[in-house]
Image: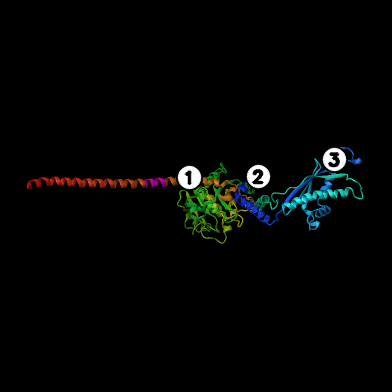
């Protein structure tokens, strides 16, 4: 696992890592709340060699002796005699063994000082214990130095109290900050261990590199996972969404597999069912036909034919009847309704698909039809049955479809071995159903999401068109309102003119009567 894989894994599962970190911190904080409240206090003393000892030697020897004694006294701090002396000095009603584990000591070799730490349930208890321990060590050390085995009026070395313990201001436990930090680190470490372990034992195809390592062939196309491709009819007659540009790139790469000897007979297969080989073969045929090349798509999957259903054509009569000699093969070729794209449905499902597909008549059909068409055969999966291997043996090559996150690496390797055994050429691999967003897209390479950018053009165009349409509607509505207002104004003006004319016409008549 490379550093890049580690980074992609972190990006893919960033919320899982954050959640485990927070959970670990909360669990440790919860555990710490059950710890007793304890205070810690420290006191210190200096270890010095007695000045009246004639055998003390020179100053360097005295310093070395003092350092050795300081280490010995540090050991004495946790012994029973010191605990007994502390109980006696403080007049405690507890056994020495109950407080022996509350003391610890450290030595500063630079100045030969002894620092003692003591733990208590209250600040006063911690302070008193720390001071009492230093005094107890002095007493026990003097007993050792002036004991019966080494009788002296003065001890060879002494402990001079240096700093008295003070009242601690806050307890040192429970330490919630330290507990939270430890829990967070532990939660993060466990999350990484799980994710990395899961990735290492995962044998599914996750990236183009996995495919190339397993098959030794180039990845000609990466088809993003698109809901439209999974629905019947939409895959070839509807909008391909983000997959449109991916299929165009696949078409281009397929043309340049062998420029001098362009393949005219291509078998499209997969390792197992459900990896999208029929969808891939249908859309390759569609896009190649759109480029102006006559294409014949043959449904050679005589066990689970899909082409007739996908293109919504009658597939009752087709390849199997032609192979049986009931009809001429060209008579059962039907138009797809798309320019330059013809279809040869599977026909009736036979009891012996392998024998029919591996027959000499099938080879003759493919050779004959490849003169007028680019022949694409939608074949069964390679691993369950031998049909695809038989077809690949007399075609120009095979295009292997692998489903990201589904096909196992060992299955890809087995497909390559099968094609090599029958002498077929592996033109390349199509990595299908590649995730385009979310954790999978980042964890499995992070590059598939780039196809999402192509969908933006259509969305932008649709938005502009909608805006334009809405603008036209508003303008039409405004024009109608203006026309109505003008007509109303004209109507009023006409009525006023008629009334004036009538009045003028009646004026002479009234004058005559007068």
- For disc 2, the neighbor class at 10 Å (few under 14, some 14 to 19, many from 20) is few
Q: Which residue is mark 1?
A: 457
* Label 3: which secondary element: helix
Q: Earlier in the sequence, mark 3 or mark 1?
A: 3
Q: Which residue is mark 3?
A: 63
Do we see residue 425 in this rendering? no
Distance, label 3 to label 1, CA atoms, is 84 Å
Q: Which residue is mark 2?
A: 3
Task: State which mark lies toward you, 3 or 1.
Answer: 3
Task: State which mark lies toward you, 2 or 1.
Answer: 2
Q: Nearer the viewer, residue 248 or 56?
A: 56
Q: Is residue 398 left or right of residue 315?
A: right
Distance, label 2 to label 1, CA atoms, is 35 Å
Residue range (magenta): 466-473
Q: Earlier in the sequence, mark 2 or mark 1?
A: 2
- For disc 1, the neighbor class at 10 Å (few under 14, some 14 to 19, many from 20) is few
Q: Which mark is residue 19?
A: none
């Amino acid at each position: 696992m490379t550093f890049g894989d580690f980074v992609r894994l972190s990006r893919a599962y960033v919320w899982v890592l954050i959640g485990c970190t927070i959970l670990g911190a909360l669990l440790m904080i919860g555990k710490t709340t059950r710890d007793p409240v304890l205070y810690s206090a420290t006191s210190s003393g200096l270890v010095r060699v007695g000045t009246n000892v004639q055998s003390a030697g020179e100053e360097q020897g005295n310093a070395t002796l003092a350092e050795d004694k300081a280490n010995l006294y540090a050991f004495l701090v946790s012994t029973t005699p010191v605990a007994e002396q502390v109980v006696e000095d403080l007049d405690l009603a507890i056994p020495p063994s109950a407080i022996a584990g509350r003391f610890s000591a450290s030595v500063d070799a630079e100045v030969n000082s002894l620092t003692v730490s003591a733990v208590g349930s209250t600040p006063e208890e911690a302070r008193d214990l720390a001071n009492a321990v230093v005094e107890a060590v002095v007493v026990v050390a003097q007993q050792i130095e002036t004991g019966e085995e080494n009788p002296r009026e003065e001890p060879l070395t002494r402990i001079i109290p240096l700093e008295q313990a003070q009242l601690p201001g806050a307890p040192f436990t429970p330490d919630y900050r330290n507990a939270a930090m430890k829990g967070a680190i532990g939660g993060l470490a466990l999350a990484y261990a799980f994710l990395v372990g899961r990735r290492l034992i995962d044998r599914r195809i996750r990236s183009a590199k996995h495919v190339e390592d397993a098959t030794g062939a180039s990845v000609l196309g990466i088809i993003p996972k698109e809901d439209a491709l999974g629905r019947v009819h939409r895959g070839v007659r509807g909008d391909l969404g983000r997959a449109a540009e991916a299929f165009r790139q696949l078409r281009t790469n397929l043309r340049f597999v062998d420029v001098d000897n362009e393949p005219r007979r291509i078998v499209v297969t997969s390792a197992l069912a459900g990896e999208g080989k029929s969808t891939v073969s249908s859309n390759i045929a569609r896009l190649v036909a759109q480029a102006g090349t006559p294409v014949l798509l043959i449904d050679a999957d005589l066990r689970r034919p899909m082409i007739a259903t996908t293109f919504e054509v009658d597939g009752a009569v087709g390849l199997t009847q032609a192979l049986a000699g009931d009809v001429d093969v060209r008579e059962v070729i039907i138009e797809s309704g798309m320019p330059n794209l013809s279809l040869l449905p599977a026909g009736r499902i036979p009891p012996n698909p392998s024998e029919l597909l591996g027959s000499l008549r099938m080879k003759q059909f493919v050779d004959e039809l490849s003169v007028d068409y680019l022949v694409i055969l939608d074949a069964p999966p390679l691993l369950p049955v031998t049909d695809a291997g038989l077809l690949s043996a007399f075609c120009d090559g095979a295009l292997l479809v692998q489903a990201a996150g589904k096909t196992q690496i060992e299955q890809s390797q087995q497909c390559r071995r099968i094609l090599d055994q029958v002498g077929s050429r592996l033109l390349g691999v199509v990595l299908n159903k590649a995730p385009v967003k979310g954790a999978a897209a980042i964890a499995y390479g992070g590059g598939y999401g780039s196809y999402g950018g192509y969908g933006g053009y259509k969305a932008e165009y649709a938005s502009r068109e909608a805006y334009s349409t809405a603008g036209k509607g508003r303008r039409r509505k405004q024009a109608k309102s203006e026309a109505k207002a003008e007509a109303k104004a004209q109507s009023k003006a006409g009525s006023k003119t008629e009334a004036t004319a009538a009045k003028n016409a009646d004026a002479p008549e009234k004058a005559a009567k007068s």
